[in-house]
Image (cartoon, grey):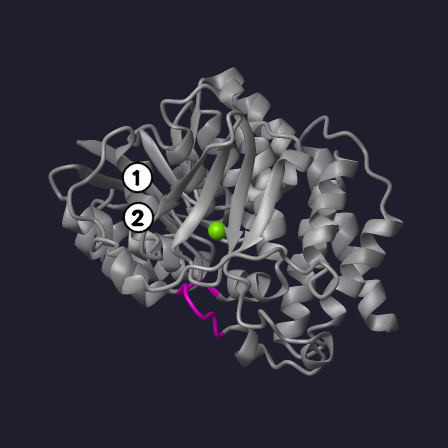
Amino acid sequence: MKKITVLGSTGSIGTATLEVVRRYPDRFRVVGLAAGRNIELFKRQIDEFRPQVVAVADDTAAERLRKDAGSVEILSGPGGIREVAAHDGADFVLSAISGSAGLLPTLAAITKGKTIGLANKETLVMAGPLVNKAVAEHGATIIPVDSEHSAIFQCMHGHNGSDIRKLILTASGGPFHGRKADDLVDIKPEEALNHPTWQMGKKISIDSATLMNKGLEVIEAHYLFGFAPGDIEVIIHPQSIVHSLVEFIDGALIAHLSRPDMKGPISYALSYPERLDGVLAPCRLHELGTLTFESPDMERFPCLRYAYDALESGGSATAVLNAANEMAVDAFMEGRITFHQIPVIIKKMLDAHKPVPLDDIETVLSADGWARRMFRELVVKS
Ligand code: MG
């Protein structure tokens, strides 16, 4: 019986994780849960899974939950969420809090030497070198849950790293794939949220529409697998059936195919190195029809280019890229900037930032803070 904690249990990855747990009750037991704002759903999850300890972002919500919590310990605030992440009862922590808020709880679990199922890409985008150092120091293990990285992890399994030449990440292209630059000007948030193949949270749906999601994933792949930016390629594959590929030195490609459903990568991380029986419906190739591939257009979707640039700059640059993007996506959702201003603002901020090496977590947080202040200045002025 694997004892697991789910951080971000009410989000789209969190609820899919609990669906997997529900389906394989003899394999997994939930000992910790943490969530943000969706208190009604969180309460139902606590009632169903009866964990030892839970945390919510908000103190008032914690008070409400304590009323009929029974033996469940209820914590709150960022400190409470970190405590749940580090709780002794769990061997496995599924890190699925969305955005930069996921970084410190994930680090807390790493310093306890746990196995982390990593769905929060910001952890590596903001603090990749520090996270890898902490993983080595504390004997923790990271298993990727992002579908592309899970695919690569599965393709690499059993192979020598030195036999691999390149990683190839697939991208659906998002809802605006194939549109001309002029058509991207007056896009509404509802259109950007309407992803053609994956059901996902709001932030990642917008990131998918700008291709920033793929840029963040290139950075994530660099820190997970240790490949140089030039050896990580992106290819557009609108059907989202091939989840990524590995190119070997002899010219062979190994690809991972499945239906686009996050329960696949979640289950693999939970049960690795075993596989669970019957997670996804089989992928019948003759029913799928044509699978197509093409190069990404970085002129029309420059966010991908900026992510490569930030990764090449190194140090604090990717933390600034991430903060700039989070602020820009929020501003777009609230109607304060247009869709095509997202990359323009991110570029301005990367140009204004002088990257520093990441010596400690304070360096990361101060780069993040700088970027958020800079964004507010730029958006008020523009
Ligand atoms: Mg992904």
Amino acid tagged 2: Gly
Whether residue 168 is situated above or below residue 348 in the rendered picture: above
Residues shaded magenta: 194-201
Q: Nearer the viewer, residue 375 or 76?
A: 375
Q: Secondary structure at mark 2?
A: helix
- Look at 66% across and 31% down and name the residue there: 228
Q: Are marks 1 and 2 in contact (CB under 8 Å)?
A: yes
- Look at 80% across and 69% down and name the residue there: 379
Disc on res. 204: none
- Quadrant the N terminus occupies: top left
- Look at 19% across and 40% down and name the residue there: 276
Q: Is residue 72 visible?
A: yes
Q: Is residue 67 visible?
A: no
Is residue 28 left or right of 5 when viewed as pictured?
left
Q: Is residue 196 magenta?
A: yes
Disc on res. 264: 2
